[in-house]
Image (cartoon, rainbow, N blue to C red):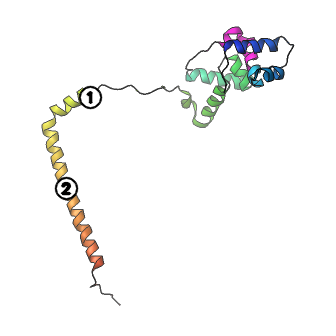
Amino acid sequence: MTKYSKEEKLEAVKRLLSGKESANTIASDTGMVKSNILFWARKYELHGELAFTKSYTNYSAQYKLDVLNYMNENGTSIFETAAIFNLPTDSSLWTWQNLLETQGSDALVPKKKGRPTMKKDTNKTRKQFDQGSVGSIEELKAENERLRMENAYLKKLNALVQNKEKSPNKTKRK
């Protein structure tokens, strides 16, 4: 999707609202999509030039529910509701509606974006290991010895089973 500057959007909207050109001619002249021009015009009618200022915001789950409820109660389209609430795109409403229908209202809670922060617990864990090292090292040695014995037992058992299968002294019972 091509991004357009505030000035380009404003110029296209003013050309449309002047009444001299249709959305189709403006779209063909500028290479913009007709539906985008109509969406921008609706937003401009409702919010003025503030409709084109970028607002990076996270919407709360309650706000999303309120917008979806408004759309259902008033019977407005997704396109028109996005313009009324000055949402950047109408696809946000499609996403919210889909999440609400498939996963419920808990899915509308905004999720933290980005990588999780690094925890500086390395020194704490090292100190905890050093403080309890006497007991934990002995426990680890005992577990290691138990695992070695178990491994040796399983190897011997496997060798016995293979020898029994290979032996030619098998007798068949009738």
Residue 92 position within the rendered picture, expressed as x and y whole percent measured from the top left: 63, 26
Q: Give above or below for 145 relative to 48.
A: below
Residue 19: assigned label? none
Outermost residue on the bottom side: it is 174
Q: Quarter of the image for the C terminus: give it.
A: bottom left
* Residue 76 in view, yes or no: no
Q: Which residue is mark 2?
A: 148
Q: Please tell me which residue is depicted at 26% across the width and 28% down the height of the picture.
A: 122
Q: Element type at marker 1?
A: helix
- At 53% from the left and 25% from the top, the residue drawn is 110
Label 2 CA crowd tier, 10 Å (few <14, some 14–19, many 20+):
few
Q: What amino acid is at disc 2?
A: Arg
Instruction: Give the left or right position of residue 16, taking residue 69 as reference.
Output: right
State whether residue 172 is above or below residue 7. Answer: below
Instruction: Give the left or right position of residue 59, taking residue 44 as reference.
Output: left
Rendered image quadrant of residue 19: top right
Magenta stretch, residue numbers: 39-56
Answer above or below: position of 24 versus 54. below
Q: Residue at x 15, y 41 (%)?
A: 137
What number is the disc on residue 122?
1
The image quadrant where one finds the N terminus is: top right
Residue 122 seen by the camera: yes
